[in-house]
Image (cartoon, rainbow, N blue to C red):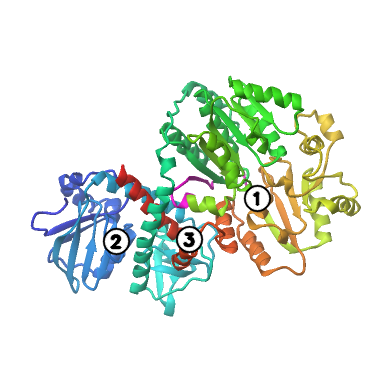
Amino acid sequence: MAQDKSLNKLLIVSITPYFLEKQVFWFDENLDEILQSTKTQSFFQDNTIFLKKGQSHNLSGLLRKLDEMGYERVFTIQAPGEFSQKGGVIDIFPINTNQAMRLDFLGNNIENIQPLNIKVENEQNAKDILKKKLKSQKLFSDLKNIKPDDYLVHLDHGVAKFSGMEKIKDHEYYVLEYAQNDKLFVPLGLERKLSRYVGFSNPVVSRLGSALWQNTKRKIKEDVEKLAKELLDLYAKKENITRSSYINDNELENELTTSFLYQETPDQIQAIEDIKNDLAKDKPMDRIVCGDVGFGKTEVAIRTAFLAGINNRQTAIICPTTILANQHFNNFKKRFGALPFNISLISRLQTKKEQKKIIKEVKEGNIDILIGTHRILSADIEFKNLQLLIIDDEQRFGVKQKEKLRQKNPSLDILSLSATPIPRTIYLALSSFKNISLMQTPPQGRSAINTNILPYNKKIIQQAIHFELQRNGQVYFLHNKIQTIEKTKSDLEKLVPEATISYIHGRMDEKELIKIMDDFSGYARSREAREKNRIDVLVATTIIENGIDLPNVNTIIIEDASRLGLSQAYQIKGRVGRSHIKSFAYLFYPKNITPLARARLKALENANELGSGYAIAMKDMEIRGAGNILGKEQSGSINKIGLNLYCQILSDAVEKMRIVSL
């Protein structure tokens, strides 16, 4: 360890990936070089503290530095990466030692440095737990779209009101306000200590530095450890299931990758890598990829289905609507065109004879990828070697539907795609029972949708349609009542007589529905046919919510957004803005709306940055309450510390138990 036998010296290093890769003996062997580096290199200056017995050292400055180096302030230390303070006594467990230490201060003088009887039994396990914690903190500290008066949770100091950013001596700080005008300045770059407060009632804000927060956190950690054990026992059966790992074919993969017409975003690349790592293990994958509409989730699904195919395993892709299933089928056929894969679509679009033929080929293993709606879950469909299930828009499927195929094949790999995952999925992902990949980086050339939330106004509707037609674009008009959709079409024709208008809804004959969508999109048609069958404005119900990619449609008008759920409205809004062309969304509301509807519209107005789908899902969960995913006891704890920190503590407890049990 990095101090001599008399404990006259102590080196403390920050919780960074660089130091987490080093073994404890490395710090002993390289102590002189580390100390030399602190004289000239800013990395070592910022990320190390070297203390000597008898040395004068500002106590409050030391506490602040430990905070900035990523150490968590707790009531009683138990593991590496934690510290506590009681008066002039600081207990700390440096990540570069196998034993916790106590620092005794008299004023600003270090009187004593002594080891405590708190040790690490397995150094590698401790490092693995900390690495997982660092990774999860990134997920929990998403501060996109944060605004003054929002509540934030500081890991060490508790719930506070965010009052804005402040610049002090060339450094930016988050300013947090606690009770009785106490303020905390958190430097930019230390976001891992912060998380957005998500709760089901207004939080209690206490004074900065009071023991209340550490006590609250300690009690919740104790309760959470019991819950983690219960949940692990519940999931133990799944944890014990294994299957043979996937192998890759680099040559074929390169062929598929180079045929992708766009530049992958960093988040897309990371999601694909996450999935490859999952499939390389012998445990079944259960991962959700969360990303806004048009952020490249389909390409991630294509690359995953490819991996299953080259391992001679079948893939089922389930979509909530025939329109989406049809679009996926066309996309997959196009992307796999030059590769030896058989892809089929099964839905009500096929005749019974065609369906019978597909079912036979699936059973014989002659179809590698089967795309369809709920029809795939029917009892008459049997796979020869199904290994991968991809669920698009997972929020549209119930738990029983999702588990149906897994009951037949417990080792099934599951990849769920969603722009706005449901609360239960978020909770399981945040608590470490599902893996999650966030895709929040927009593709090149994409710009945020210009969103207008307004009282209903025919004149603005007319102007919005005129503007889009003048630039040769197309318009979605959302009217979510089948009984009056024809009348709405007729009213729009009077309002904008020069526009060609059609409509669709979920009760139409599916072949007619697909034909109208093909006419609207101009898919697979000649230029002449596109001009002849062109539709300028498509009046539709929420059937357009799922995955239809039409780059020429860059204005959407939602007649009454107050009747839509928050996640649903966000998803539908994302039907436009699929290209580099500036896009517009008009969300109208009637004169009298409920406070809940007003809160949803306010959240939509605030979510004006690209990649806000995950934040919207969290906000939706906050507005609606936790539903049936949480018991009363958990809800009480969540209200005290916020859902993000609660799930982080639960995730840490789960990972600790998993690693220790290996």
- Give me the C-alpha separation between circle 3 and circle 1: 23 Å
* Dot 1 crowding, Cα within 10 Å, few <14, some 14–19, many 20+: many
Relative image position of residue 290 (x, y in whole percent): 55, 46
Q: Amino acid at mark 1?
A: Gln
Residue 391 is inside the magenta segment: no
Say which residue label 2 marks: 66
Q: Amino acid at mark 3?
A: Leu
Q: Looking at the magenta stretch, what is its main secondary structure?
A: loop
Relative image position of residue 61 (x, y in whole percent): 28, 67
Report the residue at 68% width, 64% height from top.
Answer: 597
Front: mark 3 or 1 = 3
Which residue range is magenta in the image?
Answer: 429-446
Q: Amino acid at mark 2?
A: Leu
Query: Is 260 drawn above or below residue 173 in the view shown?
Result: above
* Dot 2 crowding, Cα within 10 Å, few <14, some 14–19, many 20+: many
In the picture, measured across the screen, residue 46 lies left or right of residue 471, that is: left
Residue lying at the far front of the rendered structure: 379
